[in-house]
Amino acid sequence: MWRDNLRGILCIILKDMKAYYLKPPAISWGVLLPAALVLAFYLRDRGDVEELVPGLIALTVLFSTTAMEAVVINFELRIGAMERLLLAPISLWAVLMGKVLGGSVFGLIVVSAVGAGCVVGFGLFQSSLPYLIPVILLSLVVFSALGALVSVSVKEVFEAQTLANFARFPMIFLCGVFTPVGDMPAVLRHIAYALPLTYTVDGAKYALAADGGGSPVRDVIVLAAFALVLLLPAVRMLQRRFE
Amino acid sequence: MTSAIQASGLRKHYGTLAAVDGIDLSVKEGDVFGFLGPNGAGKTTTIRMLTGLARPTAGSASVLGYDVRSEVVKAKKAFGVVPESSNLYDELTALENLVFMGRLYGVPRQQCLRRAEELLALFRLSEKRDTRFASLSRGMKRALTIAAALVHQPRLLFLDEPTVGLDVLNARQLRAVVGQLNRAGTTIFLTTHYLEEADALCDQIAILKQGRIVASGTPAELKASVEAEPACTVRFSPMPQDAAAELTQRECVREVQVTAQGLRLRGPSLPRLTKLAYSYAQEKALQIEFISSHEASLEDAFVQLTGLSPDAMLAEKGGG
């Protein structure tokens, strides 16, 4: 059974890459929006550009995964293609994991390209990859699962984008991308610690700046917990759609 | 012969609504089984329960010997489903769609490619192998959707309204392929709104109304079970425009329908209807080009058992 599930997950990832992800809208959402936001902040306050790189990486992870994931499942539910996947001899878990990992793989491709651009463009790399890799991989799964949860929660594709923005935009400003979480008022700080992007930014800052200020182990544990917290209800809601 | 599908007391309730209300089914391996009924009768819900997409509220069912509650994943390897809508992936080509479906069912890659080419040839789509699904015509999409359910060579095929919305030629081609598949040993579970399609293809038929099976048997048994009102069809030459209106006024006629073949007269006595047709022709100096008595059809059985006219059922479906 697990073999069937693994094969099914791989098939769904490859199919989604071809059908949805490697298309201009997905790439523009994943790269252009984070780059534009970071550039806007840089132009307003021309500080050290390297300080913005962890934020750029984190936003790329957030947008590249959620932009399409939040739409794809909903779209397939509407046209009946999700039903086709659920009729295959694999579990519902495997179908959802295929979807989530498809978004994650796309996010990994985009964030790798952005990371490579930062290395070339800014001559960066004081990074600590053993910290960066688990933080980024887990974050990709977390935000892809967030997209999946949004996607199965609503009926229409436009509702998915609206709900995804409701989750995404507060994170841009509250999670330490542009302003360190420690400099925020206590109330906002508490909200920030309840949001997953905070741990992506923290882990990326630690790895890229190697400043020793973050807590990468905590980031990894919290992100793993977020992945579960988002995946479980997504599976349940998908099940309920077919009851 | 063993059962491909066995169901007992199968129910599906959505709140207080009983979509399927305790049906018993037995479909023999190798048969074409027709599941007929108006919209909302519970046909698709039954298929969803039998294929593991919906959990039964009560009752039991097995497909190819596997319990649909606990072993449906095993059964899925051996059955294929063609849903009512053609829902393959627009961005993938015809060949890519078939290969994806095969891989999803665990067919080895090379075998998958070979099988996909075979199916494209069977459905006369070889020339469209590299065309995106979105760019295919409606009939081609339908054919490819059926092909996609066959890549893993299922023993049982669920066909939900396979020909709805297709033109006559495409529908006829698809029916021919369904017949071919059945002759090769595939059991077919067919839902359709087209009664002549069910009559031509099915070995057994069950008629569903409001979640319950109201009749079942072979098409011949169902036709024999109804008391069809005598009818005769007549075509005059020339055909007077007011013939239908005039004949309706006659004492022995209850109803006159205009059909493609001519005028269908219904009434309590077939000899009197026939006599009337001849006397009307004499009276108006017309020639009779064609006349025939009308036997009970599956349509008659359907109308008597469901109380719904087949035309109304087709209109619901947007079909012809």
Image: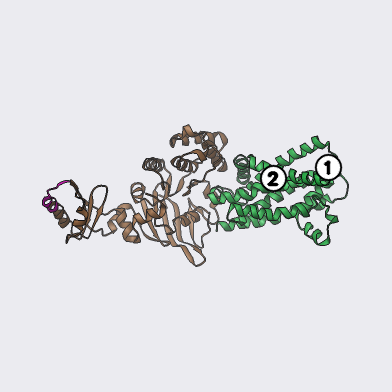
Chain colours: A green, B brown
Specify the subunit that label 2 lies on: A
* Quadrant into which the C terminus of chain A falls: bottom right
The residue located at (13%, 54%) in the rendering is B275
Point out residue B14 in the picture as x, y percentages from the top left corner: 51, 63
Pair 1/2: label in front = 1
Question: Front-most of B240 and B258?
Answer: B240
Q: Secondary structure at mark 1?
A: helix
Residue behind mark 2: A64
Q: Which residue is mark 1?
A: A49
Q: Amino acid at mark 1?
A: Val
The chain ID associated with circle 1 is A
Residue visible at 54% across and 41% down in the picture: B90
User: Where is residue B276 drawn, in percent x and y?
Assistant: 15, 55
Earlier in the chain: of badge 1 and badge 2, it is 1
- Closer to the camera in the image, B34 or A22: A22
Q: Position of residue B3 (x, y in %)?
A: 43, 52
The amino acid type found where label 2 is placed reads Ser
Q: Position of residue B232 (x, y in %)?
A: 21, 53
Alpha-carbon span between mark 1 and mark 2: 22 Å
Residue range (magenta): B279-288
Q: How many marks?
A: 2
